[in-house]
Image (spheres, grey):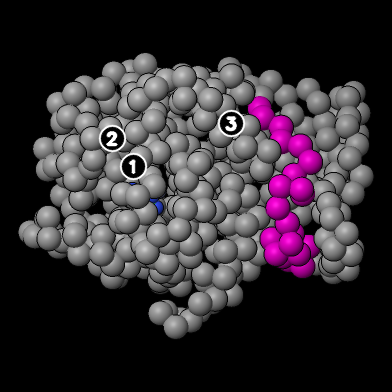
Amino acid sequence: MHSWRAALLRFDLHGQAIYEADGLLVTGPGSSGPAVIVAAGSHAELAPRFSHVPCTHLPGRLLAPGFIDMHVHYPQLDVIGSPAEGLLPWLNDYTFPHESQFSDPAHAAVVASFFCDELMRHGVTTALTFATSHPASVDALFAEARKRRLRLITGKVLQDRHSPDGVRDQTGQSLADTEALIQKWHGVDRLGYAITPRFAPSSTEEQLRGAGELAAAYPSTWIQSHVAENLDEIAWARALFPDARSYLSIYADHGLMRERAVYAHCIHFHDEDRALMRDTATAAAVCPTSNLFLGSGFFDFAGAERVPFAHGLASDVGGGTSFSPFVTMRAAYFAGREGQTKPGISLPPERLWWLHTAGAARALGLEGVVGNLQPGCEADFVVLNPQATPLLARRTSQANSLAELLFAMIVLGDDRVVERTIIA
Ligand code: GUN
Ligand code: ZN
């Protein structure tokens, strides 16, 4: 066992923040596998019980749950910052050419290693990640994540039409490859498999149906895709599937909406779509830096509370512009404030933080496993330095409440705040 004394942030079951200015976090071996939280609370209360446990004292630091990135593309590391008119030209001009390079396992291994290091440097300890259509891209990422003991979920992209040579796959082979990868990797150490149709326009009905059949046959796998991101994309999906009630319902029609299904963006929704998300226990990955960068629109946070469905935050690198959860939370705040296309709201800082930790874990079906520092959770946490820059030191020293402290870090913070990332 080991204990850590510092300020401590965690969440209760209702998503309310619990804060100890002088806290103690006790970690110990899990029954099998990763280390877990043994106890968390105020130092004064817990110290007598754990006086025999070695303690690392970190004055001035804040211990918080490792962040969860609900949607990111590891093969798009080198696509970050590629400008385009909108989503579809961005895919054709930059993304597909970059992703075609992942037919080379050596290239995939180099990028996967850099990607995992970058996640950890930014305090991200769990990620739901796209690979490319090449099975070797999945092997490369799982291998690198396993070395670092990261909790990582990924899958081979399915895209058997409207995709250029180099990334387009073949229907029957793509489904056989998916099943083989599930059997090879799903549940190995901290790794999980996600069945990954890229988006409805780039899959035939046959491929979507096959993906849905695999999702039914392997109910503990995840499903990930994109939906309702961009107006041209939506018009295209509607034209290709004229009988579907909406773009989102194409996925329901093919058995791809269920617990552990995660759809990126979910911007241009009607309340029927929100109700379908809610009724199928499907989750949204909200990607505000990507939505701002590609001019896609603004996720409607008030709508997602009015017709409540699970959602959490994501970087969506390389449409997204940063790996930093601080940058993502900041952009989510701005996206919430936008008030011309929807009623603007002011998301509280504790809520933004929850959406990137315990709330994201709930949306992924991993509540009580990661994203929190309650007893029994896996011991993934970050040591944050609220004085990491001169301006942060000045601003956070004047914070009179937890909300003020967290808001200062969200508005001014980045990777410099993350002093250490501790994995299980
Ligand atoms: N829709 C289909 N593929 C992609 C992708 O790679 N990024 C984003 N942002 N949207 C997509
Ligand atoms: Zn994406």
Three-letter residue code for mark 2: Val
Tell me the magenta residue range: 403-424
Three-letter residue code for mark 3: Phe
Rendering quarter of residue 373? top right
Image-based side of 116 in relation to 388, left or right:
left
Task: Find disc 1 in the rendering and name its residue.
Answer: 96
Q: Is residue 271 visible?
A: yes
Decide whether residue 329 is among the magenta residues: no
Image disc number at residue 167: 2
Towards the viewer: 410 or 52: 410
Q: Are marks 3 and 1 in contact (CB under 8 Å)?
A: no
Q: Residue at 61% across / 23% down in the picture?
A: 148
Three-letter residue code for mark 1: Phe
Mark 1: secondary structure: helix
Expressed as whole percent of the image width and height from the top left, the position of residue 250 reads 18, 53
Mark 2: secondary structure: loop
Image-based side of 81 in relation to 415, left or right:
left
Q: CA distance from mark 3 to mark 2?
A: 22 Å
Which image quadrant: the N terminus? top right
Expressed as whole percent of the image width and height from the top left, the position of residue 232 reads 25, 64
Decide whether residue 406 is among the magenta residues: yes
Task: Find disc 3 in the rendering and name its residue.
Answer: 114
Q: Residue at 11% across / 55% down in the picture?
A: 241
Image disc number at residue 326: none
Q: Is residue 373 visible?
A: no
